[in-house]
Amino acid sequence: MTELTVGVLEEYLRDHYGTTFPEQSLFMKLVEEIGEVAELLNQRAGRKMMDGEDDSSARLAEELADVIHYAVALVAVNQLDLTKSILEKDKQASVKYGREINLLEFIEKRNRMAKHGFLDVLEAALDKHFTYDYELNWDKKNHAVELAFILEAQNAAGIETVDDEGNASAEDIFLEEYVLFYNQDKSRFDEEDYLVALPFDAKKGFSAEFLTYFAGFLKDTADQGLDDLMDFLADPEAQEFAISWDGEAFEKGRAELVEGEFYPYPRY
């Protein structure tokens, strides 16, 4: 179904009730009128079934459950009163229409994300799609989030390598790389210190779709980097190694994303 936003919901209520609501009243009206929304969609489902339209009941049942979930969630994330009766109504509708979800867990997650912004979304995407050891460092003073990850390679032949600081070693290699998410207006940093630096607008932040895409692209980059590192160790003629970020390919894939909700820079 069409993504439900405040504007979409207000338009529905305006059409249905012939009036407009301030935002605060809008959310309360949604809670109060969930039953009427359910009844309206039930009537639509019944009419369509009588007209012999296939799958209308299933489709509208899903639409009904989604409307109820989203309406209750909107109230919750905007920190308005959420009574047990409303939660119970949502649960009953979920069971009836086969779309049961753990709404309390969902609300908790949304409230947490509202506070921590894209940081939680990024961590969830990395945990799911990125298979290397990593660490996130939230630099509040510099309005930035730094991601560090490690590539590990066995140096079975004991080949001596020298790092950027001039330290020589014949031990296994642990290569640490850094990515920076930075405030385009406030952060200060040296681009040479990072594999890639990605700017954000503090209020807009990043979408979940973008962060998922980023995590997958970073994994592919790390996989290729590890392969190149092993080739470097196996080639006695090789002089230098550096993991590379294909910015052109990254931006090409990014341009094809269909992005939904955005999560802002975290609050503290």
Image: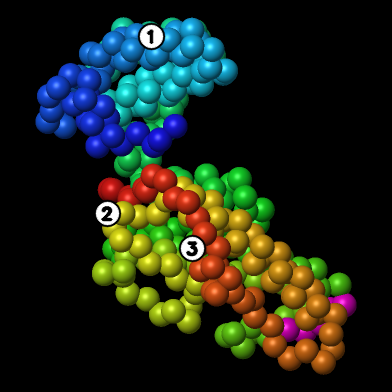
User: Is 97 left, or right, of 153 in this rendering?
Assistant: left
Contact between labelled residues 2 and 1, with CB atoms less than 8 Å apart = no
* Residue at 61% across, 45% down: 128
Task: Tell which circle, 1 or 2, labels the residue nearer the N-terminal end.
Answer: 1
> Badge 1 local density, few (<14 within 10 Å), some, or many (20+)?
few
Which secondary structure, mark 2?
A: loop
State the predominant SS element of the stretch in magenta.
Answer: loop
The magenta region covers: 157-161
* Residue that label 1 marks: 43
Residue 215, image quadrant: bottom right
Of 267 and 216, nearer the camera is 216
Which secondary structure, mark 1?
A: helix
Whether residue 211 is visible here, answered yes or no, is no
> Badge 2 local density, few (<14 within 10 Å), some, or many (20+)?
few
Q: Residue 255 carries which label?
A: 3
Residue 157, image quadrant: bottom right
Task: Tell which circle, 1 or 3, labels the residue nearer the N-terminal end.
Answer: 1
Is 108 rendered above or below residue 222? above
* Residue at 35% across, 55% down: 205
In the rendered structure, which amino acid carries the disc numbered 3? Ala
Is 187 rendered above or below residue 98? below
> Badge 3 local density, few (<14 within 10 Å), some, or many (20+)?
few
Q: Residue 203 carries which label?
A: 2
